[in-house]
Image (tube, helix red, strand yellow):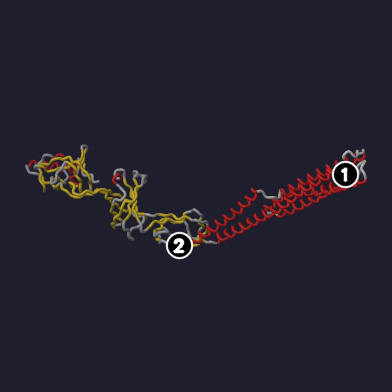
Amino acid sequence: MKTGRILAVGGAVAVLAASAILMTAFLGKATGYSTDTAGYRSISEDVEATGDVHGVDSTTYYATVTAPISFYNLKTGDEVKRGDMVVQYDLEDLINARDQAVLNSKSAENSMNGQVQASDKNQAKYNKAASDIEIYRTTYALFRQANDYVNQGQYQENWDISCIADGINKNLAQKNADIATKTSDLNLKSVALQKAEAEGDEAAMKKIYKEMEGLQSDIAKLNQDVANLNSDLAGLPPANLSPEEYAQTVLNGNWMSDIMRNWTEASTVKNTYENQILNSYQKEQLRNSFDLSTLSVDSAEENLAKAGSGVTVDFDGIVTESFVENGSVAVKGSPLFTIESSNDIKVDVGISKYDIGKINVGQKADISIAGNTYTGTVTEIKRLAEAKNSDKAKVPVSVRIDSPDDRVYIGLEADVTIHTSEKEGVLTIPSEAYYADDFGDYCYVIRDGVVAKQYITIGLSSEDHIEVEAGLANGDVVIVDAITDDAIGKKAEPK
């Protein structure tokens, strides 16, 4: 905004003007002043600012993979075109990573399928052993019931047979305790075998297999000893039995001995395979491991595809920053380069608190860059003021150049004049005639042949004119020469 002159413009000017007035008064003649008249015309108010030229679009490109760069030759200031491939990657490491991921996934699938199939077989063996145990339990009970019926109330065991039977029973108890211990050890070995299989530890697997074979052999021998003891126990002759009854009890005892042996063997088989069956959580864990390996394959394929596509520029522009060099290793997520658009250009200026209220999006502007003039439009007003260096905070405003050419250079300084307001046919005076003091805005006029001071109400102001909303009429003669209050009431005339 044109501020005009302030009261007491300058000591030297005031002295000269006063001397001229005194001399004129002394001579009795009117002083001649340069004048103009208040008149109706169009006026526009402008806000001037200086800013820097930038592309409307500014993009930093980042590495989407971690890989060596096999081609890159951009430097700051280089011009690029949309569709240019400016970065190419060395694919060797990514191909190897993809192949390794495929092998790992296949291994995980084979391991999962192998363990599930083994578990299914163990489940079948477990189910058969459990079924056999129930059959042996029922059959043994039938033979025991038959012998109990034959022996009931028919004999009284003598002392020697009782002692022998007691010794056999004690021996049986010990043998059965040993079987239980061996079976528990066998189950622990089975769990250890599963872990070794999952870890692929061949040496541990061989060792555990050997130990399990030894335990199974011991259990089989103990089962045979139990069977023999049961046979001995069953073969003890009952007292007071007829030959036919005795023969039947012996036959029943033999059957019970065979049943007990098979029963014991089935129990061992059931216990052995029970801990070699995968539960639902273990199967889910195997599936999750396989799924993770599949995801690794997908990720490796995706990285390879991204690297194979290189980096392509999305719009015409100028390289403003370059962060890598040809042959360096790009790390995923790290910046490669930054470009600003060269066809779509703006000037970023800072507007002070005194003028920001006049600025609106859509206002037209004139832009001067290196002696060339362009038109533009206000496209953005930031909500955050910024203070640069020691300057007071200013609001960033973007002015888009309507038709930039190849003489518009990114980063260059530009002068911007934003046309904030415009009025048609309003009363104005020249900017040189305008003054202001503590009481308000005013000008000097020649009225009835003498100098008068006239306070006015002003509106818009431009470089050349001030709008007068009140205080003057069309055709009033205003003085545009430098003048002071000392001339008020003195004779005056236009030059």
Q: Nearer the viewer, residue 365 or 431?
A: 365
- The amino acid pointed to by label 1 is Leu
| Label 2–label 1 contact, CB within 8 A | no
Q: Position of residue 127 (x, y in %)?
A: 72, 50
Q: In the picture shown, does residue 38 fall above or below 328?
A: above
User: Hey, which residue is sitting farthest left in the picture?
Assistant: 28
Residue type (three-letter) at the residue carrying disc 2: Met
Q: Identify the disc placed on residue 85.
A: 2
Quarter of the image holding residue 468? top left
92 to the left or right of 49: right
The answer to whether 491 appears left or right of 13 in the picture is left
Residue 84 visible in image: yes
The residue carrying pointer 2 sits among few (fewer than 14), some (14 to 19) or many (20 or more) residues within 10 Å by Cα, namely some
- Residue 42 or 278: which is nearer the viewer? 278
Q: Which residue is mark 1?
A: 233
- Residue 382, image x and y in percent? 36, 47
Q: Residue at x 69, y 53 (%)?
A: 120
- Callout 2 secondary element: strand
* Image height of 70 relative to 480, above or below: below
Mark positioned earlier in the residue sequence (2 or 1): 2
The answer to whether 257 appears left or right of 13 in the picture is right
Q: Secondary structure at mark 1?
A: helix
**Going by the image, does 217 lie left or right of 32?**
right
Residue 15 visible here = no
Q: Viewer-nearest of labels 2 and 1? A: 1
Q: Which mark is residue 220?
A: none
